Image: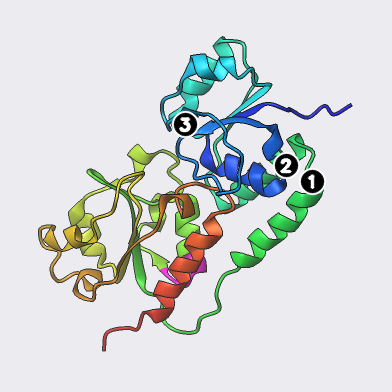
Amino acid sequence: MNSSPQRIVCLSAEIADWLWRLGAWDQVAGVTGFFSAPADAPYRPRVSGFSTANFAEIIRLQPDLVITFSDVQAELAAGLVKRGLNVLATNQRTLAETETTLALVARIVDRDAAAAKLLAEFRQRLVPVKTGRPRPRVYFEEWDEPCITGIAWVGEMIERAGGEDIFAGLRSCRSASERVVTPDQIRQAWPEIIFASWCGKPVHTESFAGREGWSDVPAVQAGRIFEIPGEEILQPGFHLVHGFERMKEAIEKWRPVT
């Protein structure tokens, strides 16, 4: 008898993607609206945003497991538990924690063998680049009003890609409110490359040049401002390998100004 959950509701896009990759899509009953399903994936009801959820619809789906992600969904997780549902709440913040979480979910759905191959690929594609040249100073912006710099896994990716995270000291701050920085702090850090992904809204790369005092910032002067799709950088799952490739490409093209 299969004891793994057969009706999973994923309120986190990275876990929905992971279950698809593992071949466990038949065990998924509902997903977040932020999940971009593959074209050939059978439809699943969309039952949540990121910080909001349709409790009635989730209950109607009769899930035997609901998976949430991060402190932002803590209230949703609590509300689901109070309604008698079985909930797994994850809060991965580093690449190591991400790998551990993916392995845990695979074990829950009895897909350890499939996960072993995918996690080996995940590790291989995130291997740090070998570079003997100077590292560009890199700023990652998760939000623009107020400015929020990247979480731990983003800083790790910057450094693995060959850059220097200008706000590495904030990496251990697990909540967004702790990673707020001022435009002047960013300017004074003198970033040579800027990556941005604004939590679900388009990044206006041209707007960086209009920030007060930013006209002489190296990244602005050289036009080295790059948007990374949210699913490739803000969702700590397998898709991070694609964001990493974008970072490596931009950093590889970088040359110090002489």
- Could you tell me if the residues under marks 1 and 2 are in contact, i.e. CB atoms within 8 Å? yes
**Residue 156 x, y percent position in the rendering:** 50, 59
Range of the magenta residues? 159-163
Distance between the alpha carbons at the discs numbered 2 and 3: 22 Å
Look at 70% across and 35% down and name the residue there.
26
Tell me where residue 61 sits by quadrant: top right
Q: Which of 224 and 216 lies nearest the eye of the viewer?
A: 224
Query: Where is mark 3, residue-wise?
Result: 71
Residue 139 in view, yes or no: yes
Secondary element type, mark 3: helix
Look at 46% across and 28% down and name the residue there.
48
Secondary element type, mark 1: helix
Distance between the alpha carbons at the discs numbered 3 and 1: 27 Å
- Sequence order check, earlier mark of 2 and 3: 3
Report the side of 59 relative to 158 (left or right). right
**Residue 172 x, y percent position in the rendering:** 46, 47
Report the side of 221 relative to 1 (left or right). left
Look at 36% across and 79% down and name the residue there.
254
- Mark on residue 112? 1
